[in-house]
Amino acid sequence: MSEIISTGLFDRAIRRITAVWREMAAGVASDEDDSIAGQMRACLAGRGGAVSARNRAAKLAETYLFLDDDGRVDFLRTLASFDSDADAVAAAVQVFQAATDEAARATAQMQLRRALEPPRLRLLTQFTAIPDGVKFLVDLRAFLMAHVRGDPRLAALESDLRGLLASWFDVGFLELCRITWDSPAALLEKLVGYEAVHEIRGWRDLKDRLDSDRRCYAFFHPRMPAEPLIFVEVALVEGLADSVQRLLDQKAPVLDPDDADAAIFYSISNCQRGLAGISFGNFLIKRVVDELSTEFRNLKTFATLSPVPGFRRWLDARVGEDADGLLTDDERTALHAAVPDAESGAGALIAILARRGWLRDPNLKKAAEPMLVRLCARYLLHEGNARRAADQVAHFHLSNGARIERLNPGADTSEKGLKESAGMMVNYLYDPARIEQYHEDYAGEGKRNASTAVRRLARG
Amino acid sequence: MSEIISTGLFDRAIRRITAVWREMAAGVASDEDDSIAGQMRACLAGRGGAVSARNRAAKLAETYLFLDDDGRVDFLRTLASFDSDADAVAAAVQVFQAATDEAARATAQMQLRRALEPPRLRLLTQFTAIPDGVKFLVDLRAFLMAHVRGDPRLAALESDLRGLLASWFDVGFLELCRITWDSPAALLEKLVGYEAVHEIRGWRDLKDRLDSDRRCYAFFHPRMPAEPLIFVEVALVEGLADSVQRLLDQKAPVLDPDDADAAIFYSISNCQRGLAGISFGNFLIKRVVDELSTEFRNLKTFATLSPVPGFRRWLDARVGEDADGLLTDDERTALHAAVPDAESGAGALIAILARRGWLRDPNLKKAAEPMLVRLCARYLLHEGNARRAADQVAHFHLSNGARIERLNPGADTSEKGLKESAGMMVNYLYDPARIEQYHEDYAGEGKRNASTAVRRLARG
Amino acid sequence: MSEIISTGLFDRAIRRITAVWREMAAGVASDEDDSIAGQMRACLAGRGGAVSARNRAAKLAETYLFLDDDGRVDFLRTLASFDSDADAVAAAVQVFQAATDEAARATAQMQLRRALEPPRLRLLTQFTAIPDGVKFLVDLRAFLMAHVRGDPRLAALESDLRGLLASWFDVGFLELCRITWDSPAALLEKLVGYEAVHEIRGWRDLKDRLDSDRRCYAFFHPRMPAEPLIFVEVALVEGLADSVQRLLDQKAPVLDPDDADAAIFYSISNCQRGLAGISFGNFLIKRVVDELSTEFRNLKTFATLSPVPGFRRWLDARVGEDADGLLTDDERTALHAAVPDAESGAGALIAILARRGWLRDPNLKKAAEPMLVRLCARYLLHEGNARRAADQVAHFHLSNGARIERLNPGADTSEKGLKESAGMMVNYLYDPARIEQYHEDYAGEGKRNASTAVRRLARG
Amino acid sequence: MSEIISTGLFDRAIRRITAVWREMAAGVASDEDDSIAGQMRACLAGRGGAVSARNRAAKLAETYLFLDDDGRVDFLRTLASFDSDADAVAAAVQVFQAATDEAARATAQMQLRRALEPPRLRLLTQFTAIPDGVKFLVDLRAFLMAHVRGDPRLAALESDLRGLLASWFDVGFLELCRITWDSPAALLEKLVGYEAVHEIRGWRDLKDRLDSDRRCYAFFHPRMPAEPLIFVEVALVEGLADSVQRLLDQKAPVLDPDDADAAIFYSISNCQRGLAGISFGNFLIKRVVDELSTEFRNLKTFATLSPVPGFRRWLDARVGEDADGLLTDDERTALHAAVPDAESGAGALIAILARRGWLRDPNLKKAAEPMLVRLCARYLLHEGNARRAADQVAHFHLSNGARIERLNPGADTSEKGLKESAGMMVNYLYDPARIEQYHEDYAGEGKRNASTAVRRLARG
């Protein structure tokens, strides 16, 4: 019975709260400046006490939700205008500049920091009082980021909000949850929407991805319980997986997960645009590796099956620049044989990649794949600069301490996979014993670790 | 983190239990009679202690699950053979017959009851030890009911099992839960399968039925937490609903449930064939009326929108028997005008009902509906006998203390609705203040309560 | 917030339910026979429908609770009078006696069973509808057992109720829960009341028994969530524990449970008198052994530290009968030396045991302990008959498949321990690999397994 | 079973995590500067990746816990030394000073803020990774506050930490929970320790305060689930309560809470010294008023029964200064009559208050009470300055929008009550309709609202 009572009454409670709050909001607005700026001033002055200030903030948040985009930009500009008091800052700066010894400097810095705390930050914090207030702020930042457009005051507001969210969404506050077919339908529906790597083609596909030889984990924040922040999909298999279509084949038999020796992370999706730049992907992978190795003692390999989303763009550009310099004589010969009417080897390669279904033509496949593998190895290991691999997915996994283990041509035959990655997928290997070393190698010296095979390919 | 740990480890625990149990099962089987009958004997003898007996019962249950239908029937016949000891019963009967005063008779009856407790009942109870043991027994009864086919021993076994389940599934042990879009996907998937009245046409339709102006409640048993026993779908609307297609229209706007004045129970489905004859429908309706009237103070009307599944079968039969006696002269005239080539008025009616899409033809609709309403009122109020209305849905609601409030021609235009109910749907009204009286009227004297309008129709 | 809403509203819901139910109860009573018997008849007739019958049953239950003991006995006699219909039973008996072949007998037995189902059983079942209805029935049986006093009708009612409770409290329906210092205070308060072996001397003592090197587990029924059925207290120690006072010493240091190699079950208490004869102790021990061996890989020994509650009674009786035949010459000599004025060796032993604080007198202790150990071994291994050891605790553990491992003189110096067990405690060893064999030995052939040392003692 | 598994396995998980973490911590320390400063540097450099940094921070936190007070102060000084980079701040200051228009200033301020973000703040945040990391930081601030002693660097660190905690403990993140006798014993034990107003004298007293006519609510933070932040104890009574001893009398009968018309808040205690200055008391009272008025429709009055902890100190000081000017002639006469040997009326008053048990002497009571009431009204309404009432409890409730409703002489006869408040207690009334106005009156103009009776007293 409790279930019902609480659910039924929860709805009622929400309605009651909403009603009370409308009244109060109406009340507070009646005898005073009810422009948005006036309301913000009243909030910051704490008029009527802290509880009233929260109610007034809630009304402001509701107002924001009813505005169109232009109205919202105005709203945010008004909000941004509640910046630190210029005179107070200038005074604190003078004290700071006058400080000579360390102790005085420490105090002056502290006071300068306080003088710089913008009032608008308190207003942002008060928005937590509304139902789903944290989600409101996350979405507000997403909107801000899309509308800053060089406005320095909006940029400053966005910077404040980013700091607030970074503090609240510290990984120490997040909860790792496993998502299964027993999870709420409303949550699963959201996963379908948030999946950014390999589209989920309906409930049947989704159920398959939550089968007994699959795992799905997500980070949640306690104040945004129905909203995943980031999630990862894992397949428990035998051996390193080399084809995402095989992984996602709904007709494939289900493996007893206790027999699996490899866990393949085949999809990682961030869900909240408003949390951009606040990173939890590396923690997610680490935590999931821990969970899985506790649950399945036979797992020996933890690796991804990842796209190379920058590969074809790079390839096209290089071919444009450098024509045939990219290819060996043998490769050129092979390509000419496969596409006799091409003007150059590189042109033949581009022509093949542009052809629909080229992977199903054995001649084209045989001609193109060896050099795609070689070029992709080179792209992953040598392109970009000392601080960043050119490919963003490679950069993410190398930063996390993974190494480039194996290239899989023809591993993603979806339209998107062919268009961005020329069908190539990469296994990034997470070796728990070496993660730290590999991270240091990459973050410190820009060294990209890879298996012997991949290194040899990149040289060849 | 607890979420993960418990889910992950739950899986492991299940596997561990399974493994241990296989070993033990293997162990117990090795040095003894491992025929099914031998195993059953060992269980009943409690060989190795009560815990071992449970393990052995679990192995028997697993064996049963691997058998085909014939094997299962054999298994159940063997199980049924563990009946009461004939000599002990005969002896107890003699004592009973010799008892002369009330006290002696009470004791003798008690002892006769004990002598009649069949050993197989203990075995059935021991099956609860397996995971999902209660569901196992519910399904076992469903199988039994389908395969008794006049075998008196199987019938006796089924009777024992029914008694056991009736005791466990007493309504005092059930939990009423509201089902929402936040319920586990696995549970919602089951609803789709169990819906017996108005087919759910996919996840979109389902989500619609769980919207804010809809309610869905189900009874659950604490030992079958993932399995609904019975569920009801309710629409919160303004006024008595008169069309199920309008209720289920996915494009219809959503009403603020606080504005609703009527709760329409438009679908009640039993989910477990193995619980046939163990009734909770009336409790479900009563409990849901209580919940809704607590949650929504504006609700004034609680009613169903129900099919009349026996109506067309009765109509066809009556037309066959009695030809035109069923219709008034005016009705016959009207029907002839609409279907000039029909041999009789009744024949015209049958011809109209048999025509695809007749409800969309204004002439046919106008000709047929008045008499359909009249005949349906008569069918509901007068057909059957003093103990049961001919229509099973009518019998269910009248037994629960509802009254027949309104007939809605053309209210269910689905194929099934036309075929069984000639498109007719009935509002049964549950008036909390009169439920008991109406129940007594029907259960005691066979009186079927109805609104003045319906009673007039039935007379007309 | 949900916490509050649900708790606060739960209280309100209970109050609402109670109010509604009083009204209804008042309503149903107004126009009809409102004697207890009349109400019972109305319940059984299902007057007003099944829901009303439940409400009426709830009113009867409330009436019962307000009665004094005599009133309750009358109430129960009235209830018992709703026995099976004598004529229907007689008729079914005739059919049964006329049945000649197996099939006819199966059917006749089934019908006889049905005829013998007493209407009062339905009434008992309906009591589940009240809040805490299951606890109500458990307590009702406790009352019945205490007041049957040879009344055969009450005995028959008690037998029905016992069957009902045995079905509901089947071990398959129970939940094993660990009880910790984080459990509800209301539950812990109950433990203090239910502890039957070693009294809990306040919250401080209780907290100590729930420390990190202690475990407490209980079985619960889902419909009696606040009421433990049976609980066991376990100490995680190094080596077989030989003193309960040392185990319960609040000043003793806490062991890191991962270093423990033995789990000592030092207290098992049944909590519900109304469930007497429905046994779950053996399941509890088995389940807890499983839990602990999963959690602590270093545990090698699972044993109890148990009293020998029948030992001194037996000893006194034997000394009365048989005087000195019980003792060896050496023992007699030693005893005479310790108690020079005793008339006989046996008399000296009894005198020692009767002396306050004899265990702290080194001379008395030295004189008495060796023969106490020998006699206790003999008592445990040889007294009683082939089906039951004389000592009830020994019988319980031997039935469960334990063996008598070690005797510990002076292991319980509490008043109760000295008075019943002469300070002796026994370690019964549960060896998971031999539990079944030992159970069979005892249950089948009456063989009591014991360690070599104990067997030698019993011979010596 | 899940209960056990998760509890048991949770312990194991913690142990495993601890072990893994020790190893890792050991690992990271091996090849590098393992001084505390070195470890802090490594954390901030993110050596080995973000996950390693967290592990390193956890090791630092553990180190801190093993240090004595001096060691901790050193540790915190080291931590404080990771301040903003002086050159970067100086540079940002220059840019800020050079900014002429608003846009440039906004950008410059934003960059100055960033330059001023001290690295130590990141380290503090990383401590959340340890189990109970939030509680660790709360306690760390409590330690800091007690040891700042004029050290400007520690003061700056404390200021940073305060900002962090204020952001995390925003009232929007807190959960209001009702505490009952069904709450975990471990939590209730903490309440006893945290109660700061009226000492809880054992479990019996505590149980009494959680009875059906009492309520206890607390705020919790989701990451400190076992630690209340602040709690309030409420009595549901008839009429304004005027004696705390009567409220806490364990022998008093329990009222049906539905009959209560007043909710008396008789104790509010802050639990976490480390959250000093981060206020939630006003939110707590507001939320509890909302909860109670939803649950009990009959409640008309919400008020406190509060001590006047500064009253006697003020009285003593005033008497010292001003001798008899405080009293009227009539009062002086009355006092002289009661204490003939006193040198002055004021001296007589002080003598009475100093006498043990004076409240039980009718003469003394009669002489002193009228003027105590008058003086207390004056103290509450007129002492202090325009921003703060002299009495801290008065200031708290006036700030929250309460008014001074009634003075109750002899309302707290405990030693503490007599020593601090001269036995006086005050009812502060919370009138939901006027809370905002009263708050504004006090916060804006320093106006202290009071009932006519109290105002008259203060004048008289």
Image (cartoon, coloured by chain):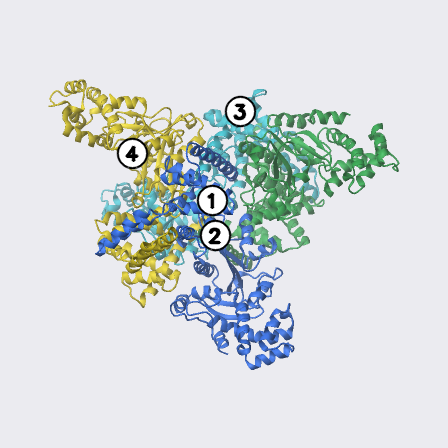
Chain colours: A cyan, B yellow, C blue, D green
Q: Which residue is mark 4?
A: B395
Q: Distance between the Cα atoms at labels 2 and 1?
A: 23 Å
Callout in the foreground (4, 2): 2
Q: Secondary structure at mark 4?
A: helix
Chain hosting mark 3: A
Whether residue A47 is visible to the viewer of this picture, yes or no, is no
Other residues around mark 3 within 10 Å, as few (<14) / some (14–19) / many (≥20): few
Q: Which mark is residue A23?
A: 3
- Specify the amino acid type for callout 3: Glu
Alpha carbon distance from label 3 to label 1: 42 Å
> Label 4, label 1: how many angstroms apart (C-alpha)?
33 Å
Give the amino acid type for the residue marked by disc 2 in the picture. Answer: His
Furthest residue in direction front, as rendered: B100
- Mark 1 residue type: Asp
Image mark for residue C132: 1
Q: Which residue is the site of mark 2?
A: C147
Snapshot quadrant of residue B427 = top left
Q: How many marks?
A: 4
Name the quadrant containing residue A341: top left
